[in-house]
C-alpha cells in the first residue's frame, strides 16, 4: 500500500480517502506471512490468535466508523483541535456507531444459531405481526426472547425489552417497527402495557433522521468517493421537537425511578427495561451508572458499559441548549474526560483475563472500584494481546495510552498492530494523544508516539527486509530531520548499502538505490555523507569509506583512507598488520574500480574542490606501504631500487601519469627525496 499511495493528503477529503484505502489494504493483508510469523514467534494458541485478530479487525472497523461519521455528517477531523473542537463529538459518534453495529452482528449471530437449533422466531407472538416487522426488528424481537425469556416478551409490557435491544443496536427503524406491531400508545406511565406518546414521537423522529442508514449514527460501510450532503439533524444536532420529547421523557424516567427506589418488593423485569429505555431516550443518566438499574444485569459486558457511557455523553452535547448552563460541548467533553480517567484508573488488570482474572462479569462493578491498581508491568503477553485494555482506552479517546500499552504488552504482533492503527489515525489527521478536560496530553502525542512506533516497527523489520523497513520510515517524511536520522541509522545497522544506496556505474553515476525513490540525488548524497560521519564516530571506518564512495564525497574519502594508511605504515603486531593489509587492499580496489584508465570522475571531483593534493598524499602512502613491506621482508635490493628508480614505483605511474596528471611534474628527485626522508625517519 505504501509503495502505491502517498502518505497524507493535501486536503481533508484526500486524507479520508487515503485512510479508507489503507484500512482496506490492511484487511486484505491479514493473511500476510509476516502476521503469521509474528503469531508463531509469540507461540499463540489458535483460539488466542483468533481473539487477537478479531480485536485488531475491530480496531480497524472502529476507526472506519469515525471516518464514516465524518463523511456522513460533513464534519472535518481537526489535526490540532482546540478544547471544544469537533473531534471529541465526532469520535463519540463513531464509537457509538461501531458498538451498535458490533451488537447488531451479535444479535443476528445468536438468532441464527437459535433457529438452527430449532427455536422458532415467533415464539408465542402473532406470526403475522412478526412477518410485518423489518428484518432487524424481527431479529431483535427474537433476541429479546432469548435473553429476557419468551414469557416476559410475550407477556404484559413485553415491548420494553424489544425496544431496549433496538436502542442497543442503535436502530430507530427497528424500534419504530416494534411499536407499530406491538405497542399500545397511551398516557399512563404506571400502565406497563402503554407507551407514552412522547416515547413513540421521539422514536419516530429518530427513525426519520436515520432514514435508510443502518443506525441512527451512520452506515457500516460508506465507500462512496464523494462527500454526501450533511444531515440537517443528527444525534449531535437534534431538532427542537426531539429536544422537547427528551424533556418529557426525562420527567417520565424520574417518576419511574422514584417508584422503583421506593418499592419494597422485587421489581418486575419489564419495569427495569422500561426505566432503561426511558433513561436512554431522555439522556437523563447513563444506564451503566443509574442506581435504580445497578442490579439489573442489563450492562453485561465492557462493550455494553462503553456504549451506555458514550450514548449518555452524546445526549449531553445538546442538553444545556435551553437551560442557560454549562456549554453543550463542555458537558459532553467532561463526560468523555471522566470516562477516560476511569479506564486509566482501573488499569489492565480489570480488563485482561489472565492470571485467574476473568475481567468484568458485570461492567458496572468497575464503577465501584475507581481506586484500583494500575496493573503494573507485565512479563508475559496477555491473552488478548493487549487489546482487552487498549480497546476501552481507544473508545474513551485515550489514544496515546492505548497504542503505547498495545505496543508494549502485545509483543512483536502488538507493535505491528499499534503501528498500523497509529498510521491510520495519522492518515486521517486524528491526533494520537489522550483527551482530558484540561486539554490534550501532549507527553505522548502524534509528534512523539507516532514516530516512536514507526521507527520501532521499522527496526523490527530491517533484519529480514531492509526495503520494507525503509518504506515504513518514509511515512515520517513530514518529520523534518528525524526521517534522515532514521534512514542513516537503518543504513548503518543493516549495512545493506547496495540495496539502499545503489552502486557506482562506469561514468561515476549512482543507480538502483531504494533511497532515490524518496529523495533527490543531492539529498541522498547528503544522507550517505552524514551516515559516513556517524560511522566514523562509531569506529566503523570501513563502512564510512563505502558510504563516502556512494555519496561521491571523494575528498572526504581520500582524507579517510590517507589517515588509515598513515596510521599503519609501520606495524608491530599482527592485528595492526591485518588492519594495514585491509586498508591497502581496499585502497587498491578503489583504485582499480574508480581510477583505472578512462575513468576521470574522481579526479574531476577533487580538482573541482581544490583537493588534488589529497591524491598526491594517497599515492605517496601507497608506495610507502610497498616500500616498508619490502623492508620488513628483508628485500633490501628491491627496496633500494624502489627508492631510486621511479619507474619501479608500484603506484607512481598508475596514479600520477594516469589519474593525477597535474602531479606528473613530480620527478624521480621528488620521489627519491621523499622516500629517503621517510626511510631515514
Image (spheres, rainbow, N blue to C red):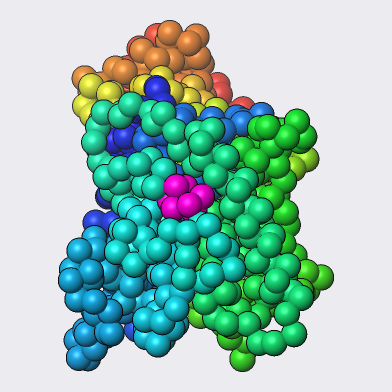
Q: Nearer the viewer, residue 404 or 526?
A: 404
Q: Position of residue 508 (x, y in %)?
A: 28, 23
Q: Main secondary structure of the magenta part?
A: helix
Residue 651 can be seen in this image: no
The image quadrant of residue 272 is bottom right
Q: Position of residue 239 (x, y in %)?
A: 50, 33
96 is within the stretch colored magenta: no
Q: Position of residue 331 (x, y in %)?
A: 70, 42
- 556 to 92, vertically: above or below: above
Q: Nearer the viewer, residue 380 or 65?
A: 65
The image quadrant of residue 253 is bottom right
| Extent of the magenta region | 197-203
- 636 to 40, vertically: above or below: above
Residue at 36 percent across and 12 percent down: it is 604
- Image side of residue 165 versus residue 118, left or right: right
- 95 to 413, vertically: above or below: above
- 118 to 79, vertically: above or below: below
Residue at 37 percent across and 81 percent down: it is 154
Q: Position of residue 553 (x, y in %)?
A: 45, 24
Amino acid at each position: 500500500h505504501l509503495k502505491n499511495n502517498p502518505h497524507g493528503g493535501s486536503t481533508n477529503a484526500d486524507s479520508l480517502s487515503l485512510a479508507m484505502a489503507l484500512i482496506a489494504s490492511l484487511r486484505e493483508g491479514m493473511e500476510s506471512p509476516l502476521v503469521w510469523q509474528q503469531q508463531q514467534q509469540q507461540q499463540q494458541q489458535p483460539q488466542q490468535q483468533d481473539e487477537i485478530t478479531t480485536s485488531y479487525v475491530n480496531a480497524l472497523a472502529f476507526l472506519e466508523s469515525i471516518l464514516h461519521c465524518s463523511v456522513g455528517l460533513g464534519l472535518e477531523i481537526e489535526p490540532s483541535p482546540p478544547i471544544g473542537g469537533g473531534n471529541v463529538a465526532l469520535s463519540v459518534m463513531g464509537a457509538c456507531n461501531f458498538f451498535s453495529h458490533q451488537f447488531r452482528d451479535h444479535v443476528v449471530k445468536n438468532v441464527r444459531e437459535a433457529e438452527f437449533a430449532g427455536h422458532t422466531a415467533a415464539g408465542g407472538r402473532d406470526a403475522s405481526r412478526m412477518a410485518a416487522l423489518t428484518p432487524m426488528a424481527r431479529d431483535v424481537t427474537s433476541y429479546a426472547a432469548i435473553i429476557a425469556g419468551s414469557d416476559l416478551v410475550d407477556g404484559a409490557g413485553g415491548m420494553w425489552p424489544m425496544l431496549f435491544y433496538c436502542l442497543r443496536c442503535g436502530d430507530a427503524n427497528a424500534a419504530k417497527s416494534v411499536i407499530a406491531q406491538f405497542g399500545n400508545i397511551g398516557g399512563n406511565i404506571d400502565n406497563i402495557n402503554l407507551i407514552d406518546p412522547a416515547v413513540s414521537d421521539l422514536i419516530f423522529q429518530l427513525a426519520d433522521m436515520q432514514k435508510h442508514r443502518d443506525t441512527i449514527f451512520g452506515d457500516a460501510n460508506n465507500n462512496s468517493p464523494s462527500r454526501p450532503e450533511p444531515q440537517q439533524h443528527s444525534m449531535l444536532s437534534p431538532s427542537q421537537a426531539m429536544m422537547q420529547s427528551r424533556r418529557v421523557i426525562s420527567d417520565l424516567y424520574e417518576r419511574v425511578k422514584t417508584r422503583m427506589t421506593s418499592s419494597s418488593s422485587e421489581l418486575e423485569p419489564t419495569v427495569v427495561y422500561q426505566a432503561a429505555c426511558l433513561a436512554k431516550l431522555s439522556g437523563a443518566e447513563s444506564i451503566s451508572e443509574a442506581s435504580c438499574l445497578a442490579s439489573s444485569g442489563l450492562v453485561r459486558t465492557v462493550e455494553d458499559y462503553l456504549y451506555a457511557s458514550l450514548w449518555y455523553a452524546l445526549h449531553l452535547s445538546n442538553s444545556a441548549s435551553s437551560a442557560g448552563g454549562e456549554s453543550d460541548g463542555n458537558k459532553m467533553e467532561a463526560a468523555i474526560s471522566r470516562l477516560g480517567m476511569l479506564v486509566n484508573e482501573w488499569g489492565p488488570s480489570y480488563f485482561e483475563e489472565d492470571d485467574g482474572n476473568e475481567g468484568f462479569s458485570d461492567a458496572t462493578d468497575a464503577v465501584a472500584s475507581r481506586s484500583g491498581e494500575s496493573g503494573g508491568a507485565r512479563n508475559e503477553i496477555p491473552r488478548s494481546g493487549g487489546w482487552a485494555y487498549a480497546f476501552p482506552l481507544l473508545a474513551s479517546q485515550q489514544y496515546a495510552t492505548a497504542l503505547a500499552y498495545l505496543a508494549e504488552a502485545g509483543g512483536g504482533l502488538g507493535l505491528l498492530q499499534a503501528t498500523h492503527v497509529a498510521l491510520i489515525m495519522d492518515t486521517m489527521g486524528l491526533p494520537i494523544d489522550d483527551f482530558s478536560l484540561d486539554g490534550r496530553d501532549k507527553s505522548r502525542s502524534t509528534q512523539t508516539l507516532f514516530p516512536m512506533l514507526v521507527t520501532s516497527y521499522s527496526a523490527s523489520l530491517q533484519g529480514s527486509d531492509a526495503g520494507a523497513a525503509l518504506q515504513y520510515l518514509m511515512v515520517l517524511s513530514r518529520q523534518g530531520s528525524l526521517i534522515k536520522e532514521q534512514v542513516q541509522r537503518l543504513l548503518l545497522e543493516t549495512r545493506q548499502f547496495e540495496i539502499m544506496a545503489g552502486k557506482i556505474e562506469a561514468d561515476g553515476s549512482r543507480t538502483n538505490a531504494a533511497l532515490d525513490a524518496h529523495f533527490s540525488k543531492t539529498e541522498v548524497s547528503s544522507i550517505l555523507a552524514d551516515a559516513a560521519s556517524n560511522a566514523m564516530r562509531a569506529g566503523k571506518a570501513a563502512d564510512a569509506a563505502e558510504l563516502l564512495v556512494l555519496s561521491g564525497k571523494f575528498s572526504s574519502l581520500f582524507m579517510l583512507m590517507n589517515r588509515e594508511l598513515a596510521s599503519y605504515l609501520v606495524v608491530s603486531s599482527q592485528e595492526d598488520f591485518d588492519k594495514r593489509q585491509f586498508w591497502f587492499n581496499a585502497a587498491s580496489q578503489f583504485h582499480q574500480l574508480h581510477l583505472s584508465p578512462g575513468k576521470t570522475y574522481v579526479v574531476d571531483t577533487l580538482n573541482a574542490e581544490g583537493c588534488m593534493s589529497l591524491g598526491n598524499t594517497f599515492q605517496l602512502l601507497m608506495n610507502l606501504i610497498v616500500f616498508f613491506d619490502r623492508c620488513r621482508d628483508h628485500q633490501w635490493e628491491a627496496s633500494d631500487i624502489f627508492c631510486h628508480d621511479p619507474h619501479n614505483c608500484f603506484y607512481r605511474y598508475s596514479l600520477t601519469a594516469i589519474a593525477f596528471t597535474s602531479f606528473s611534474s613530480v620527478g624521480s628527485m621528488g620521489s627519491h627525496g621523499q622516500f629517503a626522508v621517510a626511510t631515514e625517519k
